[in-house]
Amino acid sequence: MDLFYAPLDEIKKVRKEISDPFLRAETLADIFRINTLYMIKLAGSGHIGTSFSAMDIAAWLWLEEMENPNARDSKDSDIYFSSKGHDIPGLYSILIGLEKIPFDFLHKLRRLNGLPGHPDISIPFIAANTGSLGMGISKARGMALARRLKGEKGRIYVLTGDGELQEGQIWESLHPAANGKFSEITAIVDHNKLQSDNWVKDVSDLGNIEDKFRSFGWEVERCDGHSLREFVKSLREIKEAGIKNQKPQVLIADTIKGKGVSFMEPHNFKGGGYKYHAGAPSDSDYSAAFSELSAALNKKLESFGMSALKFEKVPLPVKSAPKKPENPISAFGEELVRISEDRKDIVVLDADLAADGGILGFKKKFPERFKECGIAEQDMVSVASGLALEGMLPIIHSYSCFMPTRANEQFYNNASEKKKIIYIGTLSGLLPATPGHSHQSVRDISAVGSCPELIMVEPSSEKEARLAIRWAVEQNVASTYIRFSSVSLDLPYTLPENYDFKKGQGVLLKEGKDAAIVAYGQVMLKEAILAAEILSAKGISLAVVNLPWLNVLDREWLKDLADFKIIFTLDDHYIKGGQGEFLAAEISRTFDKPPKIFSFGVEDIPVCGWNDEVLKYHGLDSKSLAEKIEKIIL
Amino acid sequence: MDLFYAPLDEIKKVRKEISDPFLRAETLADIFRINTLYMIKLAGSGHIGTSFSAMDIAAWLWLEEMENPNARDSKDSDIYFSSKGHDIPGLYSILIGLEKIPFDFLHKLRRLNGLPGHPDISIPFIAANTGSLGMGISKARGMALARRLKGEKGRIYVLTGDGELQEGQIWESLHPAANGKFSEITAIVDHNKLQSDNWVKDVSDLGNIEDKFRSFGWEVERCDGHSLREFVKSLREIKEAGIKNQKPQVLIADTIKGKGVSFMEPHNFKGGGYKYHAGAPSDSDYSAAFSELSAALNKKLESFGMSALKFEKVPLPVKSAPKKPENPISAFGEELVRISEDRKDIVVLDADLAADGGILGFKKKFPERFKECGIAEQDMVSVASGLALEGMLPIIHSYSCFMPTRANEQFYNNASEKKKIIYIGTLSGLLPATPGHSHQSVRDISAVGSCPELIMVEPSSEKEARLAIRWAVEQNVASTYIRFSSVSLDLPYTLPENYDFKKGQGVLLKEGKDAAIVAYGQVMLKEAILAAEILSAKGISLAVVNLPWLNVLDREWLKDLADFKIIFTLDDHYIKGGQGEFLAAEISRTFDKPPKIFSFGVEDIPVCGWNDEVLKYHGLDSKSLAEKIEKIIL
């Protein structure tokens, strides 16, 4: 199928020929939506709903409102960034249309050396790294403070989500900004009333947002975020009031998620499963959306006496999909439902990512024992403490990039109470690599793995996922963190028929005599097996060991590795603080004549891109691994 | 000198003979204050100001208000706990006076096998582990949820501080509690208006607390927290309203820090340096406080026609103090001031612990470049990002138990921006062991040590502290975490005259040929040197190496260790994720014939107690170390 985008010449024409700033911004916003749709469809993923809801606001700010926006070489420039960062495809299309970013990058969303899935300051005119929620107002205050100390001027505009307001850091950052009279900060809430796939009010209702901000000492106004005249009037009023009253300001802009494409707007959506939060639209949705957006645009152009826009056409490349992929998260979810029939003490908590956590089955079957906590990881982890103190068994879920990091101290506090809690961390590891480093969890083992009373495991298959949750519920007396990769793959290995999931013990997936490689999880075990196959063709015999235990080891089992003169460790995590480091230390503490150890894993902040290109970039694809291993062994 | 406490018989007499519940609670609160004063003076530390401000409230709840308070074996019991947990000496004195805890424990505050410095559920009638701030309302909701699921009743009372309201988790936890209609939760704010040593309004003003809570959907009332009749009236009204309106309630109780002892009450205190937040009173302050409290008590008893209370007398044991202790934190602070004369880009941020961070000199000299952020670590760490993005060099301070854990994701977000920030973490390591595990930071290296672009170091002396901050500001292009122990010790070692602070390189403090022990920081290096001396007397020659680099190593330098057949690592941290694990792994990855490694460090949640008894408990005092090393070597 074909994809369409507006080329630079056409954008420049519109910028030049429409003189009314409101009409110009509205028209360009329409064009930028089309280019955003193109970028996301081409990339195969991206947040379309919020890119569209925030588009009119962002377009106006960049086109008309700001002085020298985000110009790093200019003093007194105005700054704009999005705290949630999910709307970045929309901002990219603006920056590309305004020639701030080379046009060629339109074709490189979420690609290696392209435009990352969440904002990163390595890209021109991006002011701050965001994507982890709730940090924006704090960052804005730091910027404003620096400007004051340097004697420089300039306003700072921060866009936030509404679901994002569930994060405690937002409220933590409000009164210092008010106390410091930071009237140079204007926050704008992209109030589209949906978070991920559900209504904010159903997930964790925020009540009267205006009252809340006002009680924290902010100047507050509310407006329609799609009527530019109203938005601009409110923005100018509130800035004036803020300067007069020496207050930071928040403009709550009522917006519509997916704005501009009728079937992406949630008018008729009742709750549960809004489809256009993240991910690329289907082929047919793409075509329908493009038709609607381009028709509306051309009608507008026609009304100005302009000709229809000439789009460029690009064929959508065909990607291969796995044939019979394993989905350990679903398997876990099914097993959890089974276990929970008898275990009435199990309560499942989630932080606005239930669909990704395999727990919708539980939610459906045991609605009274399922609690959606919203984007409030600290609160959720401490709620689990309260449940456990009262004798329940909480099983709580979020992404591994958020839960053990945002609620890090809460994990330790829970560990100190020595009550059993099961943590389910999904989206763990380097892949998928398209969302970028805020969502690539390669630090969670080190972040909480040293907590006593917390055993971390990563299942490598559906079978092991079932064994892991059974073990956590039925056998482990302490707490368990089950770390899941969210990538579904065709797996070139199977666990032995009679495999027993024993604490601290690994299992041989492939025999070998020259050396052994120890890994965990489907992503790295697959690469390890494929590397062993490459090496095998060269006459090198590499054993592959699956060690699902990330921070405990059975020293007796470890002796199984004693015959290998070289052991490779392979982490889906930073080498530092990963399983390999623990394993290497344990080996050197256990063996009288320790083997030589070589460790593979992530070493720098992960890059963004397609999975294969990112694995290769970090030297963790089977071919790179085989090359490195061959060099070492020979 | 002599200390005095009210024995159980006398307490029982008062409980029995005063029939009016208000007079009885008031009188017992006076007695419990005297016993709290005794406990803290005997222990040598403890939070007296808040124990006294919350005393009337807590005494009433435990004596009169609650049904089966905190009874673990009873369904439907009411639950009380303090979210801040600092007021625990006051609660202990109540529990002891009510025979919930054996009376003998009155003499065991902050001692091994005694009463921990912050709440721990290993102690009878303690409902939750707290001391890390802001978690209480979340925990209460978890408890209430469990009760609902189990079909059990009972109210939950959570005491919070007012400074504690600066923590984002408080606000994160409010709207879920309101949305869930948790009318069984009553929060009481011990609104004494001081946090640590300063006025809340000067640190980070909370504005109108009532409005804030109300805007989050809570039932709100305010009352005098020292007039029991008013407090009880408000409490009952608000509970009734809460049940009627299906809302959680917050009662903001105006209290006085240090209440009951005129000179501990801050009536005339203007700001900066309130003396009775933590720490034991001086001998003279103790005597004056006891005199005032006992005189007031006896006057009250006399007015009821009762005889004066017969106190027991105990001599205060004399503790030895270090003779010429080193204070690396002060040395750092002095050097920072010197460096900052020329470096106008340096901005210092603090999270309500400036006096402990050695940064008061900077604050005095460069007030415009010092920003107090309050108890808001997430906000502070992200403010540092904003400052760094605008070209400043932020140097930010809090305790190591809080900053890298509460703001863990913010650390990583900052690392991803690759801008230079210097983090100063004090109160690191196992000691002082009196505050208990919430304040014993033995997990911070693992919590953030895997962040790329962040180098962690721990200075072992005043000299090394000066070198470390110079290196961080002038040489390191990336970010640095300087980890400080807050214990001042006489040190049995000195650094070489010509010592150069080189990235990843250790330095020999004591020569030896049989084995080497590698450690860092004054606490463990002192024990290592003393252990080497013990071993030397037995003919074993142990080299001692100071390796201040916690997560980077110079592999060339590492070869200096190649001649040792045995290397011991010694962490002031959990073994898991500590320096020793990293060192062991690096050795096994570097040496062709790696030496045998043995690792010492913390293995379980640290116990609370005096420093010497806690070091011994964890097998980390010089004698235990020498014994273990001798066994291994021989």
Image (cartoon, coloured by chain):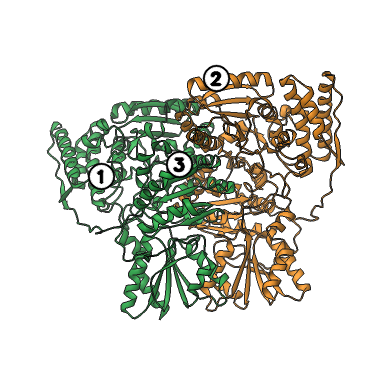
Chain colours: A green, B orange
Residue that badge 2 annotates: B240
Name the one closer to the observer, B139 or B10.
B10
Contact flag, marks 3 and 2 (Cβ < 8 Å): no
Q: Quadrant of residue A487?
A: bottom left
Name the one closer to the observer, B617 or A174.
B617
Q: Secondary structure at mark 3?
A: loop
> From the viewer's perspective, is residue A627 above or below residue A90?
below
Tag 3 or tag 1, which sits nearer the N-term? 1
Task: Give residue B362's position: percent from left, percent from top.
Answer: 64, 45
Name the one closer to the observer, B314 or B154.
B154
Query: Which chain contains the residue that carries disc 1?
Result: A
Name the one closer to the observer, B49 or B60.
B60
Residue that badge 1 annotates: A36
Front disc: 3 or 2: 3
Front disc: 2 or 1: 2
- Measure how far apart labels 3 and 2 are at the Cα level: 32 Å
Front disc: 1 or 3: 3
Q: Which mark is residue A344?
A: 3
> From the viewer's perspective, is residue A418 above or below residue A265?
below
Q: Residues within 10 Å of mark 2 (few under 14, many from 20)?
A: some
Give the residue type that dot 3 points to: Lys
Q: Secondary structure at mark 1?
A: helix
Placement of the C terminus of chain A among the 4 image quadrants: bottom left
Residues indicated by labels 1 and 3 sit on the same polypeptide chain:
yes
- Measure how far apart labels 1 and 3 are at the Cα level: 47 Å
Q: Residue at x 75, y 63 (%)?
A: B492
Q: Residue at x 44, y 64 (%)?
A: A547
Query: Which chain contains the residue that carries disc 3?
Result: A
Give the residue type that dot 2 points to: Glu
The answer to whether residue B75 shows anywhere in this view is yes
